[in-house]
Every structure is written in C-alpha cells, then in structure tokens.
Image: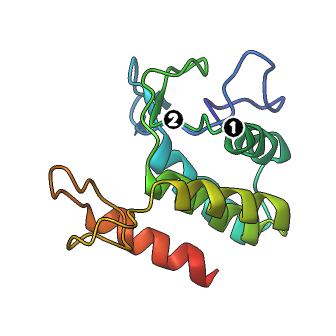
Amino acid sequence: MPGGRSKAGISATRFLFYETRYDYGKDKYASPQDIRTVESLVTILHLSEAGLAHPESIAYIRKQVDAGTLFGTYSRTGVPKDDVRSTAIYALAAMIGSAAGDKALYERAIARMNELRTTGTGGPLDGGFGDPATGQAYSFDNLTALLAYAY
C-alpha cells in the first residue's frame, strides 16, 4: 500500500506515495526515512503499466503536476521536505499518465518537464536538461525525458 501496508486499504492519514525501504525481517517499512519521489513514481509507473495503480495516487500526482509542485522528497505524511523540481520527476509523471490512459496528465507533465529544458543559451546543454550556469546535467534526467517523449 502507498505509505504503508494496510489490509483495509489506504488510510486517509497515509500519504499516497510508496516508501523506499522495507524490512522483510521485521515486516515493516524502515523508518523514519523520507519518501523519495523518483523512487515512488517508478513504483507507481510499474503499477500503472500493470493496471494496479491506486487512483488516489494518480489523482495526487495530477494535482501536483497541475500546480507545478511535484517535489523531490516528502515526509511519510505527505509534507514536502524540499522544493526540488526535477526533469525526471515530471518525466515519470508523464509516463504514469500515459500508462494510466490519462492524456491530460501526460501532456501537462510534459509541459512541466519542458519548463526545465535549457534553450537559447547556445551552450553545450542547449536543448537538453541541465544547468547552463554550472554546466551540470544528469543523464538520468535527460534519458528519462527521452523516454517520456516516446511514451
């Protein structure tokens, strides 16, 4: 279950993303780790591809994409722990939209992702995703963006 295991389903007090680490020996999620959005979205993507994603998780992603507030890390209760917006996060949200048959989510996430694209600098990162001021770019961001365009 997102945010934790529950036989009764998703608790209203549980965050709708997936925790990062599970201790099988103790039969519980490792705590007090924050939830890393990229890792959670990969899980939701695979669940979407299998038709098993929780609609509440997709709705939460849609809301955050629309607001431009899908951030890098959340507490276990869903409070943003940073204001990091990354190419990979929006690319994964787009792929989830495609896999879930939510064209509006796909298109809005691609638009958000493209807001992070480097254009008009004439530098080596122009047209890609990175920081032209530092020259730093992450291959995961760029490759995930390419996958999102192809979904």
Residue 16 lies, in percent from the top left, at 69, 34
Residue 22 lies, in percent from the top left, at 43, 37
Q: Residue furthest left?
A: 134
Residue 73 lies, in percent from the top left, at 45, 31
Q: How is the image coloured?
A: rainbow
Residue 31 lies, in percent from the top left, at 40, 20
Q: Which residue is mark 1?
A: 64
Tell me: 134 left or right of 111. left
- Point out the tag, 1 or 2, that comes first from the N-terminus: 1
What residue is shown at x 63% (from left), y 39% (from top)? 68
Tell me: 137 left or right of 20. left
Type of residue at label 2?
Answer: Phe
- Work out which quarter of the rendered image holds the N terminus and state it: top right
- State the image quarter where residue 26 is shown: top left
From where the camera sits, is residue 145 visible?
A: yes
What residue is shown at x 57% (from left), y 73% (from top)? 148
Where 68 falls versus 144 (above or below)?
Answer: above
Q: Secondary structure at mark 1?
A: helix
The residue closer to the viewer here, 141 or 18, is: 141
From where the camera sits, is residue 102 visible?
A: no
Where 108 falls versus 101 (above or below)?
Answer: above
Mark 1 touches mark 2? (CB < 8 Å): yes
Q: Secondary structure at mark 2?
A: loop
Type of residue at label 1?
Answer: Gln
The residue closer to the viewer here, 22 or 85, is: 85
- Work out which quarter of the rendered image holds the C terminus and state it: bottom right
- State the image quarter where residue 114 is shown: bottom right
What residue is shown at x 76% (from left), y 46% (from top)? 62
The numbered disc on residue 71 is 2
Residue count near mark 1 (Cα–Cα under 10 Å), binned few <14, some 14–19, many ≥20: some
